[in-house]
Image (cartoon, rainbow, N blue to C red):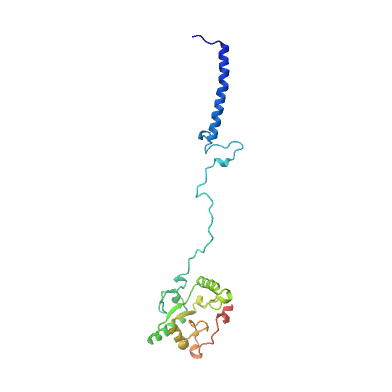
Amino acid sequence: MTRPPPSARTSTLRFRQPLVVGLVAVLAAIVVAIGHPLLTPSSGSAATPGQDSSTLLPAPSLSDRPRSHAPHSESRGAPDEADGVVPDGVTVLDDEVPAVANLDAELLDALRRAAQDATDDGVAFTVNRGWRSAAYQEELLRKAVAQHGSEAGAARWVATATTSPHVAGDAVDIGPDRATDRLSEHGSAYGLCRIYRNEPWHFELRTDAADRGCPRMYADPTQDPRMRQ
C-alpha cells in the first residue's frame, strides 16, 4: 500500500486534534449541565477552595433537627382523691378517704357522734368537702377568681391555701340540707358550729360551744380575721 507523504499525515493530525478537543469540551459541558454523579464530590472528599463545605454534609435526620418546645405544662395532673377530692356518697365514717381521714381528730370524733345520733332520727350525713391539699385549694381559688371576676369576689367563698381551715383539716362541708339544718340547730351540743352565714354547709369545731353556744357567725370569710393573716 502506498503511504501518503509526511506532509499529508501532518495535515490530517492537525485537523483531527481540534475536532477531538472540541468534542471533549462539548461532552464535559453536557455532563456538568445534567449533574453527572461522577463529577459530584463524594461525602468523604474535601471541599475545593471557594466551595461551601456545608454542601458536602448529609442533611440532618429528624432526630438531629432542632425541635420546637410546647408550652410548659404542670407536671402534676388534676387534683384527685389523694388531694382531698371527695367521691359521691362519702360519710364521716369513711376512713379510707383522705378528705375524711385527714380531718382533725377531735373534729372527726364530734362529727361521728353527731352523725350517729342523727341516724337514729333518720338523717344521714354526707361529706361534700373536708381536708384538702394546698395545691387543690389553690386550684379552687383560681377557678373562683375566674368565676367571680376578681380576687375580692372570690375571697367571699374560697380562702387561700395558707388561710383555709380545710387545708388545716379544721373544717368540713356537710350535706344534704336535712343534715345541715340539724347541725345548725343541734350542732353546738357536739361543739360543731356554723362559721359563715353565706355557707350553711361549713362547720368547724368550737370545743366550748356546748357550754357557751356557738360564736356569732361572720357574714362571709372576708370578715374572718383568720383570712387576713
Outermost residue toward the right in this view: 50
Q: Would you place residue 196 above or below residue 72 in this image?
A: below
Front-most of 99 and 102?
99
Q: Is residue 161 in view?
A: no
Residue 70 point in image, percent of width and height:
53, 58
Residue 69 point in image, percent of width and height:
53, 57
Q: Residue at x 58, y 74 (%)?
A: 151
Where's the C terminus, which quadrant? bottom right
Q: Residue at x 40, y 86 (%)?
A: 118
Front-most of 149 and 156?
149
Q: Residue at x 54, y 32 (%)?
A: 30
- The tally of labels here is 0
Outermost residue toward the bottom in this view: 211
Residue 55 point in image, percent of width and height:
56, 41
Q: Would you place residue 67 above or below residue 53 in this image?
A: below
Front-most of 21 and 164?
21
Q: Is residue 120 in view?
A: yes
Front-most of 2 and 201?
2
State left or right for residue 32 relative to residue 185.
right
Q: Residue at x 49, y 90 (%)?
A: 211
Residue 10 point in image, percent of width and height:
57, 15
Q: Quadrant of residue 127?
A: bottom left
